[in-house]
Image (cartoon, rainbow, N blue to C red):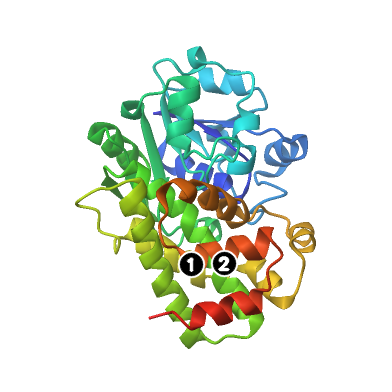
Amino acid sequence: MKIAIFGSGSWATAIVKIATETHQEVFWWVREKEIVDGLKKHNHNPLYLSQCELNTSKITISNDIKKVISKADNLLFVIPSAFFARSLEGLSAEDFNNKNVISATKGIVPETNQIVAEYMRDNFNVSYANQAVISGPSHAEEIAKENLTYLTVGSHNSLLAKHIADSFQCRFVKTTISNDIEGIEYVGIMKNIYALSVGICKGLGFGDNFISVVVANGLQEMETFLALCSPLEERNINNLAYLGDLLVTCYSQHSRNRTFGQMIGFGYSVGSAQLEMKMVAEGYYAAKCIHDLNKTFKAEIPIADAVYRILYKASSAKKEFDLLSENFQ
């Protein structure tokens, strides 16, 4: 089986590692020359997840996105949401004819405030029947170490979901399937906001007892938001694609969103925290996108609202969480 993968960050590199375990050929779109050179010379990504050795004998690397798209029927996008639309400029619906599009982006496209599935449908005429999403509690650093990881593949097309899930199952990855592509995408976005809130609490000096309350309330907020924006009767918010992803992002030392939030809690300005971090903290962009989307849905999501005000309105982090603490249950 052939697969094309787009993106060159830590998560994309981890996805490529899995793909080389399970696919005969991997075509990898990498834009940065430094990364291309490092991969070809040293079999690892020199900028992201550099400890992850890759079987480059199975990988064809190119910075020509159209060429990579033409090489496989299954296209897996792992581009940070902030750069997603920009990366696809110059492409047309014709480029995606008879292709399956799989997203592992875990973010909203900020130019349109859409999840990737909606963006691909509206801009490139890729039907939901030809789309899937990969998510779950899965830090790239653990995949690099081949620690046992569980992924969920969501799609309205159960045959496509099973096909993708089967093709990504290997020695250290187990997979499940779901029909909740929208819910999985939204949770993959919102959990970054709550991980950021946990980091803020750590930076402010709150302890584990209070943080557990923040996480529990964050789960309730996600469920409330999903019920309004993407209602699905049989959705179980306690499954690994929802609760599992939230927990690992909130509690893991590898969580860049938690790290970013902790810097804010310590008193860094948003700009200073962004400069110091080498990788994108999706929660920063997610906070504004969810805030804007919620003008339509009007869900009660006070933690997400507080994070938005802290990041975009220069509201006091301590004041916001002191107020939240009065109303938590």
Above or below: residue 283 compared with residue 56: below
Alpha carbon distance from label 2 to label 1: 6 Å
- Where is residue 186 drawn, in percent x and y? 42, 49
- Residue that appears at 34% across and 44% down: 153
Q: Quadrant of the N terminus?
A: top left
Which secondary structure, mark 2? helix
Rendering quarter of residue 205: bottom right
Q: Which mark is residue 306?
A: 2
The front one of 114 and 147 is 114
- Residue that appears at 31% across and 53% down: 227
Amino acid at pointer 1: Pro
Amino acid at pointer 2: Ala
Rendering quarter of residue 89: top right
Above or below: residue 53 compared with residue 204: above
- Residue that appears at 54% across and 48% down: 292
Above or below: residue 247 compared with residue 46: below
- Where is residue 222 drawn, in percent x and y? 39, 60
| Mark 2 vs 1: CB contact within 8 A | yes
- Residue that appears at 27% across and 46% down: 178
Q: Which mark is residue 302?
A: 1
The front one of 96 and 313 is 313
Residue 148 visible at all: no
Q: Residue furthest top?
A: 94
Q: Residues within 10 Å of mark 2 (few under 14, many from 20)?
A: many
Q: Which mark is residue 114?
A: none
Is 155 left or right of 17, judged from the image as shown? left
- Where is residue 322 drawn, in percent x and y? 57, 82
The front one of 110 and 102 is 110
Q: Quadrant of the C terminus?
A: bottom left
- Where is residue 298 drawn, in percent x and y? 42, 53
